[in-house]
């Protein structure tokens, strides 16, 4: 069970937390650190302890079950719960208190609860059912999954159908929207704004956002076509199509999202960017909104910014041990540039924020210039790029040098001016972090040269270059082994000395598909990191204007693992699959 995938529902009392220390599960220092975070952010103590990596959700649940004198169960490993058992507790009560019945005899009902301290609900259920009610502790995530499964909660498609029916019973404004949009531009803007405030449209937008957050999507795509509307969620790096309302609601949905993002609803010819914040339960989610005019209408893409996932321990990101050692060494250098490269959505922001969080202390003046500021960190001065008024990466970075910084983070090096200022900052005693867009780590050095950066400058300033990707992990709930031919893996570039074969076959793993992973076989993602340390030999190659291929070979000789080699380790370690390795990384074999 991944620590980052679940959030415990319990608000641990200080007494229970002290018992964790007494039992040796956490240290007093870890408790003190968690209490400081709790006071600063207001999160639940159990959530903070898990988020910090001090203990797993399973471990804390086992501890709580012991302290409360009830058993700890795993719902996913149980047989199907009979309908007559589910019927003993009304759905409204089950969802309100995050519980579900899973066993019943003639005079006793056993329920799985996420909060064992909520003893009053047990008395209420006893009076309601006339049976003795016993509780067992289970993961909140598993209970919520079981609630959706057994109570046959309204599906996205059913919910949309109900909303559409509601809209038909009132004035059919959606039909008039489409007509006015084609005929009269001025009237269209007024009409669309009015319809955007209609209850059915608000419910549609809320449903789209809530389902995306529930599915742990990173992006929402709302795409208009000639006759229909398509909605897709990017989950673990892959797009999945979702139920969508009729095309006639598109304009009203766009207007509603623009209103929520403080954008101009009357402007439908130019791209617009904004952001909004929504609250789901006790948590808040920031969304970056991008509106792009297309031929059939405006396409909207929303990036969900999970602040909890942007600042995690470096050891939990997926670094191989030797790569993490280089990263820690270069990250704590007094000056120089550390570059991170990769495509959009490859986890660069998470790596940068995690590094800055580990360096964040009262002794350091840390300043960042970003576009956008995805996550605000206490103790770090963050500047939002605003190109329209002249606040570019270069302008912000130039001002930083007059603010007595120790550590600087530049969201992206896009041009020679930004690169030159960043290098000058690194050469004058500042530690600089930034990102670049290239396919691999050695290619970043070539990219700097193409921008016009002189080799003697980049060779003097660079400390390390990291290329990273995200690979989907196998779902732990439905993970199973299977065998493949040894020769087949060797043809894919897997070194034979890393393979443990039996009768010419090698055991690998894959996900069968279950409720926990929505039938995909994958749950969560792990990072692949190609870490090139700029040693003296690499510096000399930069000065000699060596090719990226030559630098790559030198890097591998000094211990650098390529993205494919990192993926192979994850494959053989049972973390991911062959299909993911091939999808995410390129072969190191030439030709």
Image (tube, rainbow, N blue to C red):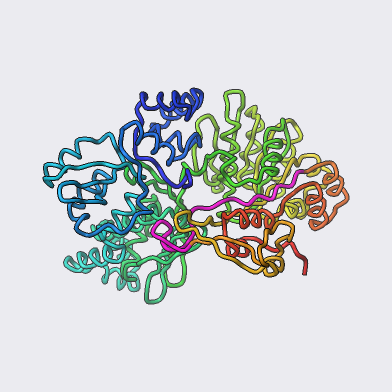
Residue 66, quarter of picture: top left
The picture places residue 345, in percent across and down from the top left corner, at: 55, 54
* Magenta range: 512-533
Q: Is residue 367 left or right of residue 500?
A: left
Residue at the spot 38% in from the left edge and 54% down from the top edge? 77
Magenta highlight on residue 526: yes
The picture places residue 501, in percent across and down from the top left corner, at: 67, 62
- Judge whether 209 appears above or below 389 on screen: below
Relative to the observer, which residue lies in front, 203 or 515?
Answer: 515
Residue at the spot 34% in from the left edge and 69% down from the top edge? 181
Residue at the spot 52% in from the left edge and 39% down from the top edge? 311
* Total numbered badges shown on the rendered structure: 0
- Judge whether 21 appears above or below 286 on screen: above
The answer to whether one can see residue 269 in this image is no
Instruction: Name, please, the residue furthest toward the front.
Output: 503
Q: Is residue 472 left or right of residue 18?
A: right
Residue at the spot 49% in from the left edge and 61% down from the top edge? 511
The picture places residue 476, in percent across and down from the top left corner, at: 48, 53
């Amino acid at each position: 069970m991944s620590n980052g995938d679940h959030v415990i529902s319990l608000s641990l009392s200080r007494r229970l937390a002290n018992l964790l220390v007494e039992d040796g599960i956490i240290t007093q220092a870890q408790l003190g650190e968690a209490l400081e975070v709790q006071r600063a952010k207001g999160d639940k103590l159990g959530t903070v302890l898990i988020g910090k990596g001090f203990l797993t959700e399973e471990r804390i649940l086992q501890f709580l079950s012991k302290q409360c004198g009830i058993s700890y169960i795993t719902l996913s490993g149980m047989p199907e719960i009979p309908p007559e058992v589910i019927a003993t507790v009304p759905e409204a009560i089950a969802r309100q208190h995050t519980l579900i019945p899973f066993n019943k005899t003639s005079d006793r009902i056993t329920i799985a609860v996420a909060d064992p301290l909520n003893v009053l609900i047990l008395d209420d259920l006893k009076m309601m059912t006339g049976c003795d009610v016993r509780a067992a502790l289970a993961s909140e995530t598993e209970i919520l999954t079981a609630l959706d499964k057994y109570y046959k909660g309204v599906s996205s498609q059913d919910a949309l159908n109900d909303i559409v029916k509601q809209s038909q019973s009132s004035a059919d404004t959606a039909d008039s929207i489409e007509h006015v949009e084609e005929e009269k531009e001025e009237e269209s803007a007024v009409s669309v704004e009015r319809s955007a405030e209609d209850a059915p449209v608000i419910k549609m937008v809320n449903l789209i956002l809530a389902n995306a957050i529930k599915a742990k999507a990173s992006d929402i795509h709302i795409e208009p076509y000639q006759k229909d509307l398509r909605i897709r969620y990017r989950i673990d790096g892959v797009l999945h199509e979702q139920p969508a309302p009729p095309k006639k609601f598109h304009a009203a949905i766009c207007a509603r999202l623009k209103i929520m993002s403080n954008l101009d609803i009357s402007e439908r010819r130019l791209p617009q960017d904004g952001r909004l914040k929504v609250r789901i339960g006790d948590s808040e989610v920031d969304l970056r909104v991008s509106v792009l005019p297309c031929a059939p209408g405006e396409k909207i893409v929303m990036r969900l910014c999970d602040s909890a996932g942007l600042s995690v321990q470096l050891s939990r990101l997926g670094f191989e041990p030797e790569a993490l050692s280089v990263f820690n060494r270069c990250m704590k250098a007094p000056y120089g540039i550390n570059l991170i490269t990769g495509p959009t959505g490859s986890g660069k922001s998470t790596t940068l924020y995690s590094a800055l969080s580990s360096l964040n202390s009262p002794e350091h003046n840390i300043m960042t210039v970003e576009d956008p500021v995805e996550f605000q960190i206490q103790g770090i001065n963050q500047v939002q790029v605003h190109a329209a008024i002249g606040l570019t990466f270069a302008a912000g970075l130039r001002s930083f040098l007059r603010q007595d910084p120790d550590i600087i983070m530049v969201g992206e090096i896009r041009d020679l001016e930004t690169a030159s200022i960043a290098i000058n900052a690194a050469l004058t005693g500042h530690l600089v972090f930034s990102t670049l867009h290239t396919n691999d780590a050695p290619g970043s050095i070539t990219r700097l040269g193409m921008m016009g950066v002189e080799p003697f400058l980049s060779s003097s300033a660079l400390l390390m270059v990291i290329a990273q990707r995200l690979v989907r992990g196998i779902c732990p709930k439905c993970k199973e082994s299977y065998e493949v031919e040894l020769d087949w893996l060797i043809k894919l570039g897997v070194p034979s000395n890393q393979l443990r074969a039996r009768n010419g076959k090698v055991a690998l793993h894959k996900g069968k598909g279950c409720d926990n992973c929505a039938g995909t076989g994958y749950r969560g993602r792990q990072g692949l990191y190609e870490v090139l340390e700029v040693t003296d030999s690499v510096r000399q190659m930069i000065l000699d204007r060596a090719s990226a291929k030559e630098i790559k070979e030198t890097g591998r000789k000094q211990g650098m693992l390529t993205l494919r080699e990192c993926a192979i380790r994850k494959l053989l370690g049972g973390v991911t699959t062959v299909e993911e390795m091939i999808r995410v990384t390129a072969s190191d074999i030439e030709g």
